[in-house]
Amino acid sequence: MSKRLVVIGGVAAGMSAAAKAKRVDREREVVVYERGPFISYAACGMPYYIAGDVPDYQELIVRTPAQMAKQGVEVHVRHEVTAIDVAAHTVTVRDRTEQGGDGRTFTQDWDKLVIATGARAAQPSMPGVDLPGVFALRALSQGMALRRFLDERQPRQAIVVGGGYIGVEMAETFRRLGLDVKMLIRSGQVMRTTLDDDVRALVEEELARQGVTVLQCQPVAFEGDGRVAAVVTTDGRYPCDVALLGMGARPETALAQAAGVALGPTGAIATDAHMCTSVPDVYAAGDCAEVLHLVTGQPDYIPLGSTANKQGRVAGAHAAGAQASFGGVVGTMVTRVFDLAVARTGLTVAQARSVGRTVSETMIKARDLAHYFPGAAPIHVKLVVEEESGRLLGGQIVGRQGVAKRIDVLATALHHALVIEDLQRLDLSYAPPFAPVWDPLLVAANVAAK
Amino acid sequence: MSKRLVVIGGVAAGMSAAAKAKRVDREREVVVYERGPFISYAACGMPYYIAGDVPDYQELIVRTPAQMAKQGVEVHVRHEVTAIDVAAHTVTVRDRTEQGGDGRTFTQDWDKLVIATGARAAQPSMPGVDLPGVFALRALSQGMALRRFLDERQPRQAIVVGGGYIGVEMAETFRRLGLDVKMLIRSGQVMRTTLDDDVRALVEEELARQGVTVLQCQPVAFEGDGRVAAVVTTDGRYPCDVALLGMGARPETALAQAAGVALGPTGAIATDAHMCTSVPDVYAAGDCAEVLHLVTGQPDYIPLGSTANKQGRVAGAHAAGAQASFGGVVGTMVTRVFDLAVARTGLTVAQARSVGRTVSETMIKARDLAHYFPGAAPIHVKLVVEEESGRLLGGQIVGRQGVAKRIDVLATALHHALVIEDLQRLDLSYAPPFAPVWDPLLVAANVAAK
């Protein structure tokens, strides 16, 4: 068997794994198969590319196959791995580069394999989901298609189906492009699993203020004659000329499952701290894999670009023979919702209770800068605290400035199991242009300590 | 003896102590003597008030004597405590409210005393330092006088003597008001004790870019006929029509010293974690007091509004009978220098070596946002790491956005003695408008780990 690392998937986790493996072991052959036309792109940037903030899709591309080749990594785009044979240590690859043809199929052997197949948009097998004008937003090609559609067709009425964070980001993008925007959400709640109700209310207030209508209803079909014209729901029919699936992501696990690679309780691929799967010499990383949640101690499914990069790096390093491990996450997330930043880390009250913790919650409203400083704006901080231990279990922050700043302090606190008294004691930076003399985090900690 | 808390000084620490004591024990009499005309103001906001960002000085005032009276705290402005008798548990107070007169002097007894006399601008006994047009910036009345002077006299040429952070902030203010600005610094180095040379170079580059001239020379006198006209130095005479003392702060300890209250090795008042001084029933808090530096384990003198508020709160709570302690600082600071935020925490390389630590240093340049996001700008992160243990000892960050955010993560790390590997594992927030997929902190940690 040759000393060859094969990587399936060439976006965040896959390219991180490939690049890192090559840096660790220059002698190792590293081959990447990516079924789409692009590698190594910033998928999280697509809402801003579609909005026109990022003029050219090429700015989202971090590295091209030619650049990877210079680093000694062989990349094949439009090559789909259709099967993994773990006993034979081979993959079957279909070459899709030939236009229109079926493409040749060949076998490639490996001594180490990284599965980085990513995720797909959660989408029901709803009638009409394949109609032109209905979009998902995982691959760059989907983002490019949506932008082209918006340019060429000039739709006026957008519907976002679902309230996940990509749905919320795209509601903003559509609105900024001048479209009418409705969000149709089964629960009626945006970011349902990531925020508590009181924090969500602030987000929904901002959406309403910016003209986004959020409706509770269950979409059952897309309708249209050669192009989407409406979303049909259990509560009626909503006309639209563009629609986006924003119901979250599901791990792409079919290939791994077929090869006998074990999935975890979340339905994503289970791994250990080295990103090794249940099958020797086979790694998984990124949006197809589970992640250890350090607050619950349980595997979780939280697909994010930042995690994918870290996991890929660990998988690549370990596969190439270096010491490397991924420490897990604490569930940190931030997103922009028009003028607000919305961030969370750890567990919401609902999540904490669902894993059997007894918690108290503190929600404060403060100012993000010194009260007299131009541009000072309200900021809301919520802390979730375990009652008996006083340990911080989670935080949620909504505001205009310094939100990502503050959630990262709470994330660091969660990594090291800090209690509220530890938070109260933090020597956080202070200057009028950046924070009030009592940072909102300290205000929240002081209130929570009472 | 009555159950009376007397507080000397009514700005940050003093008013925090008074307000907290009253909240802890509603029955306790709380009396504050402030020698100036104002209480409870945000001294750190003065550069922005003088620049016109904050239109009215009253916006800097958090609480007035009348508001404090409603909370049951008795405040006397223009009342100077001239002596403390710790044996008799009394203070001698001079009433300066009578215009022109000497004011009556009286004695007030206390069972607990908080000394919150603050700091004064370091100023040599230089000839001419009392000339009109030479300003310090500690008390609000000094800030108001400077703003009035700028309005009425319309000076064109400002000189800042010294390179402390107030000096740097005022250099910005003068420049933004259209004045020519020179900084005359004995060492030639701005923020000499707070930044390492490589980080300082970035600050000096920004000052130069914004038209501030920094000169190495030792000022020896101010000259002028009824108003400042020049600063005389060992290297020549520099004309000016306004001058600012920016050489840092010195603790106001004369009153405490005369009463037999012990000073610490830094020259500020020594306290324990409850802010108790060497004398029973006497507390000290704020810019007149030392602070425990958690990284060195030694007392330090780092006068900051944020620390003063925390110390005051602890002193007031403990004096009123509650449990309270101040945990110490890690040396966190942030300031704005024109378009840059400049932050530091922990120890610089020079500081670490001066306390006998063997350290390595890592300096990286990254982007503060996703590279393709509009407004993404360079950010520099420096880490100071103890060689043997891998423990983080300090950090310095310079950039345009998210600087205060990131220094607070490092500050939290310092509080809990994290090592570089801990930093590498942090699950920090990521979204294109707020951070790159590899946060600059993680990039720096990854480089430092090599």
Image (cartoon, coloured by chain):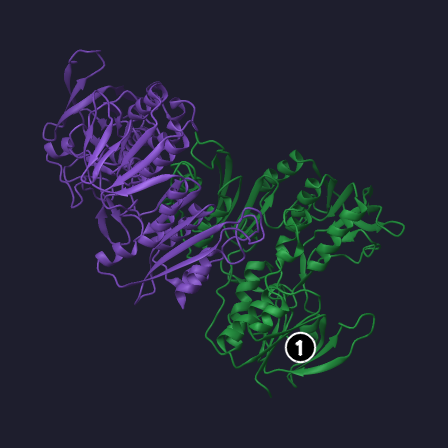
Chain colours: A purple, B green
Tell me residue A345's x, y (percent). Answer: 34, 50
For the C terminus of chain B, the image quarter is top left
State which quadrant residue A385 falls in.
bottom left
**Label 1, on which residue?**
B260
Q: Residue furthest bottom?
A: B1
Residue placed most toward the observer, A321 or B134: B134
B231 vs B116, left or right, is: right
Q: Does B431 appear above or below B287?
A: above
Tell me residue A423's x, y (percent). Answer: 42, 60
The reply to whether residue B274 is in sight is yes
The reply to whether residue B421 is in sight is no
Query: Is the residue marked by circle 1 packed among few (<14), some (14-19), or many (20+) residues within 10 Å?
Result: few
Q: Does B40 appear above or below B94?
A: above
For the N terminus of chain B, the image quarter is bottom right
Q: Does B281 appear above or below B401?
A: below
Residue placed most toward the observer, A114 or B175: B175
B224 vs B370, left or right, is: right
B236 vs B31, left or right, is: right
Q: Chain of mark 1?
A: B
Find numbered disc 1 in the image and state the secondary structure of the residue it sits on. loop
